[in-house]
Image (tube, grey):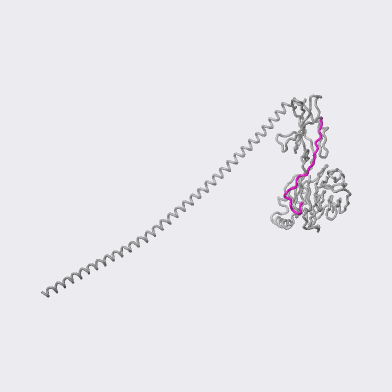
Amino acid sequence: MGSFSVGGQQGRADLSEESLRKITHTLAVKNEEISNFICTLKQSLENLEANSNRVQDDLQSEFGSLHTALDEMKENMLTRIKQERASRTYELQNQLSACSKALESSEELLELANQTLCSSETDGFTQIQVSECQVCDNTVTIVWTLPEPDNKIEHYILEHRRTNHEGPPRIREDYPWMVVEGIRETEHTLTGSRRPAARDPRLNSDQSYSVLPFLFSGLRFDTRYMTFRVRACNKAVAGEFSEPVTIETHAFTFKLDSSSAHQNLKVDDLSVDWDSSGGKVQEIRKEKNRTNSPLHSPARSALMSPKRAPTARPGRDRFTAESYTVLADTMIDAGQQYWEVKLDRESKAFAVGIALRSLGRFDQLGKSSASWCIHLNNWLQQSLTAKHNNKARTLDCPIPNTIGVYVNYDEGVLSFYNAKTKQLMHTFRTKFQQPVIPAFMVPSAVQSGQRKNSGTSSSNASLT
């Protein structure tokens, strides 16, 4: 009985051990399978990441190519649009210009036709008597007549406008008609009432010289010719205008020539600023011009009209040293000319006159035989002198606000007047061997050695 029990227990133990071995083996197999599966998953994950990165790079490369192609298409389309617009604009501008010329020609033909139709009737209209009209100083006297007396006429209307063209008036002029009404006689005198132009607000520096034009509320001589026409009026209606007549005014107009100005004078047509740094700037520009533009380059040999010929001698660009001078851009070689210069009473020094074209670049006005001037000195006490060939004559007359300059080239006369009172201040008599040019000198306050930091402007003037 006892041995049977022991054997049974041993058998059960063997069975349990065998079962455990099987379970352990199974677990080991499963564990290996799980490890292999994990490795497979890791490999799959790595492959997935590699594939996704490759796909992403390919996609970015594809989009980059597309963007480049789109940008090129955009540039090409913009270029074509701009070219098409420029071409169309050019064509339309040409058409517009052609139409404008055609319209102007049509208007001229229409005006000519109207004048032709009315030519047979004008004999009965008011007529301006050109031979009896007079032009003197700043006045023009116009005289007209009627074909026969008419006591029904109450007054006349006179119209005038400035022009630079001789002969019959054109359809389009640069200046409008000015009207004078209520004239009771068969003549009328137009007088220019002077009023100085406002000072240029840009000229606020302590040392400045401004050249500004005179303005006239009535007549203004700044064109070569003036055109006039007149018509009679009764109570009911105004008659037809007379045939327009064009009268020469002998106007003398000019601007300042910046190429002749001292390097410390900043010139802009009718204004001059004192520029203390101008010397350095001009030296730099001059050196640059020497390198870039030779003396006989096309820039120096450009053709100019006879009246706008270069005022400086060949080889001289501007005045220098203590000759703070600027010349006009128009020379006088014949006839009688007149202009006016308005002086600033606060100016410390100023000179106005004329010079020969041969005036040296170092010469001050009045200190050589090539210039004549009136010189104002306002430093310690006021003095007005006439200067020529380094000789000075003190003038015993009040210092005017405006100086009138009269030149009779053929007679060799240069006169200075008080423009307001018409008082003769001084007359030079000579024989001009060369063309002369209006000249102005503006000595600097610093160079004079007094009140270097003065709060007043060194020199100002206005030119008519």
Please, which residue is most extreme toward the front here? 1
Q: Is residue 32 magenta?
A: no
122 or 445: nearer the eye? 445
Q: Quadrant of residue 219?
A: top right
253 or 49: nearer the eye? 49
246 or 189: nearer the eye? 189
Residue at the image point whose x is 36% and y is 60% from the top: 45
338 or 357: nearer the eye? 338
Residue at the image point whose x is 52% and y is 46% from the top: 77
Identify the magenta region: 185-208
Residue 321 horizontal/vertical position (percent): 79, 57
Q: Quadrant of residue 408?
A: top right
Residue 85 horizontal/vertical position (percent): 57, 43
Residue 63 horizontal/vertical position (percent): 45, 52
Indicate the quadrant containing the N terminus: top left, top right, bottom left or bottom right: bottom left
Residue 413 horizontal/vertical position (percent): 86, 45
Magenta region, mostly helix, strand or loop?
Answer: loop
Please, which residue is most extreme toward the left here? 1
Indicate the quadrant containing the C terminus: top left, top right, bottom left or bottom right: top right
User: Is residue 307 something that shows in the picture?
Assistant: no
User: Is residue 343 something that shows in the picture?
Assistant: yes
Q: Is residue 187 magenta?
A: yes
Answer above or below: position of 399 versus 452. Answer: above
Task: Judge from the rendering whether residue 111 lies leftward or rightward of residue 153; answer left or right.
Answer: left
